Structures are given as C-alpha cells and as structure tokens.
C-alpha cells in the first residue's frame, strides 16, 4: 500500500472516480473490477453503484489529498476536477481518461492503453506509456512524457515540456514557453507555436521543414551526412533561457505558426 499525506498539505476535496474493469480482490477494491483505490486520512472511500444494469460501473466518492489507483485490464475514468497528488497505474490494455487534474504531483502510467487528459495543472507531472498513445489537452507546469511505441499529442503547452518517444510521432502546440525538449528515435515531430512566441530554436532531423510564416532571426542551417541542424531565434529574441529543441534523427521535423484559436478543438 502507498504512503499517504495528511491534512496539513491543504484543503481536501471530494473527487469522483468511475472504474470499468474485470475482476478484483483486495481491501478497498471494486467488487467487480481489478482496481484498487487508496485514500488518505485512514477512512475508506465510499462506494456506490450508479447504474445497476451496467454491472461493472462503479463510482468512488473519495475525500483525499492523495489518490492512488491501480488497475489491470479495465478503464479508469475520472470525471470533473481531481485535486491533490495523483498516482494512477494501469497495466495490460487498461486505459486512463481524465477531465482535469490539479495538484503538486501527478504520476500516470499505462502499458498498452490510451492515456488521455483534457486539462493538467501541476507543479510536476510524469506521464508514460509502453505501447499506448498519450493525448493531452491544455497542460501547465513542468511536464515529462515518455512513450516507447505510441504517439504523443499535446494540444497546448504552457511551461516546461520534455517529451521522448522511442517509436511514434510527437505533435505539440506551444502557447507559452519555458523550456521545450522533444525527441523521437524513430518517427517525426510536428511543432506548432504561437505567432508571438520568443525563443531560441534548435531543430535536428533527417529532414526539416520550417514554414514561411515562422519568423526566425539569425537562422543557421548545417547539413550533415545523416540530416540537417537548424538554429536561430524566434521573433527577434536573443535569450537562451527559453528554448525549443526538437530531435528526430530518422524522421522529419515540421515547424509551424498557429494561432491560439486554431489550437482549440471544438469537439468532445
């Protein structure tokens, strides 16, 4: 069982978690799914069945500063906003879908299932998947993403972002910048930036395509046997504290300008 923080870290919030899955055992485990839920404060989560006809649907109403979820072969769906420090580990083909997370630390991992978060507001986050896609909406803070054989998509990044994919594609829109580092060993990278963004730029790949609508000062292009390296400054800045680095040694890097409105996805 995981250690828990106390009430001294701040106000405790009521969180709603729904879990679909197979079978399970263990204390505080859903009776019909292999998912365990742990909360702080020494009290068990309250469990209610919202739709008896569905059989495997459970709602967990949890009052906790820390939330820990483990599941094998099912679905973890977090509705609304979850506050606090969150640990979610989904193995096998389990998927994780979250509306909004807000807290100091977030750690989410899947093996062969989708990891999807619409809104992420944290000081530090680590999200990983072995073979599933990582799909994020609007993210804020220091975000680290790791994928072995899946794609990484970030609709809007504000802060520091470090994304690494062994095999797959990375698609990121940078709205506000701290430090952004993107790398894919076997695959391509698409970087979209706000038109007014100021940053140092370093792109390295087998092929690089910088759109004409991107204004790069002091651009330097160096060709080598296995690819191209482009460096420069976006929008007349000379600072190196804020930068975008992208590396795709066996793929193509595409760099585009995009408005905030274009980054919005007006669908569920």
Image (cartoon, helix red, strand yellow):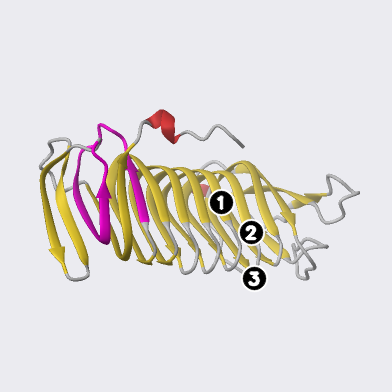
- Is 191 displayed left or right of 22 in the figure? left
* Circles 1, 3 touching at the beta carbon (< 8 Å): no
Q: Nearer the viewer, residue 48 or 229?
A: 229
In which quadrant of the rendered view does residue 44 lie? bottom right
Instruction: Please tell me the numbered disc located at residue 95.
Output: 2
- Residue position marked by numbered label 3 in the rendering: 92
Residue located at (27% from left, 50% from top):
209
Residue 7 in the image, given as x and y percentages of width and height: 55, 49
Residue 114 in the image, given as x and y percentages of width and height: 59, 58
The 10 Å Cα crowd at callout 3, few under 14, some 14 to 19, many 20 or more, is some
Is 199 contained in the magenta span?
yes
Is residue 1 shown above or below 99?
Answer: below
Q: Which residues are magenta?
A: 189-212
* Circles 3, 2 touching at the beta carbon (< 8 Å): no
- Residue position marked by numbered label 1 in the rendering: 116
Q: Quadrant of the N terminus?
A: bottom right
Q: Which label's residue is closer to the chain start, 1 or 3?
A: 3
Q: Secondary structure at mark 1?
A: strand
* Circles 2, 1 touching at the beta carbon (< 8 Å): yes
Q: Nearer the viewer, residue 92 or 187?
A: 187
Residue 151 in the image, given as x and y percentages of width and height: 48, 59
Is residue 74 shown above or below 260?
Answer: below
Q: Which label's residue is closer to the chain start, 2 or 1?
A: 2
Residue 23 in the image, given as x and y percentages of width and height: 80, 68
């Amino acid at each position: 069982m995981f250690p828990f923080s106390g009430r001294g870290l701040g106000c405790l919030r009521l969180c709603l978690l729904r879990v679909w899955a197979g079978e399970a055992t263990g204390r505080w485990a859903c009776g019909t799914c292999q998912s365990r839920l742990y909360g702080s404060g020494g009290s068990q989560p309250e469990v209610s069945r919202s739709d008896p006809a569905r059989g495997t649907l459970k709602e967990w109403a949890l009052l906790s500063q820390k939330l820990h979820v483990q599941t094998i072969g099912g679905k973890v769906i977090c509705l609304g906003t979850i506050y606090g420090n969150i640990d979610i580990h989904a193995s096998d083909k389990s998927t994780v879908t979250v509306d909004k997370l807000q807290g100091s630390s977030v750690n989410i991992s899947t093996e062969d299932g989708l990891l999807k978060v619409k809104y992420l507001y944290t000081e530090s986050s680590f999200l990983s998947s072995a073979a599933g896609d990582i799909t994020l909406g609007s993210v804020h803070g220091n975000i680290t993403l790791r994928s072995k054989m899946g794609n990484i998509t970030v609709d809007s990044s504000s802060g520091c972002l470090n994304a690494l994919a062994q095999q797959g594609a990375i698609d990121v829109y940078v709205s506000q910048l701290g430090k952004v580092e993107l790398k894919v060993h076997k695959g391509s990278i698409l970087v979209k930036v706000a038109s007014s963004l100021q940053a140092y730029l370093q792109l390295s790949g087998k092929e690089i395509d910088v759109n004409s609508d991107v204004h790069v000062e002091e651009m330097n292009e160096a060709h080598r046997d296995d690819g191209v390296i482009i460096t420069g400054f976006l929008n007349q800045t000379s600072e190196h504290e804020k930068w975008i680095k992208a590396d795709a040694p066996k793929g193509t890097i595409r760099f585009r300008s995009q408005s905030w409105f274009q980054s919005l996805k007006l669908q569920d």
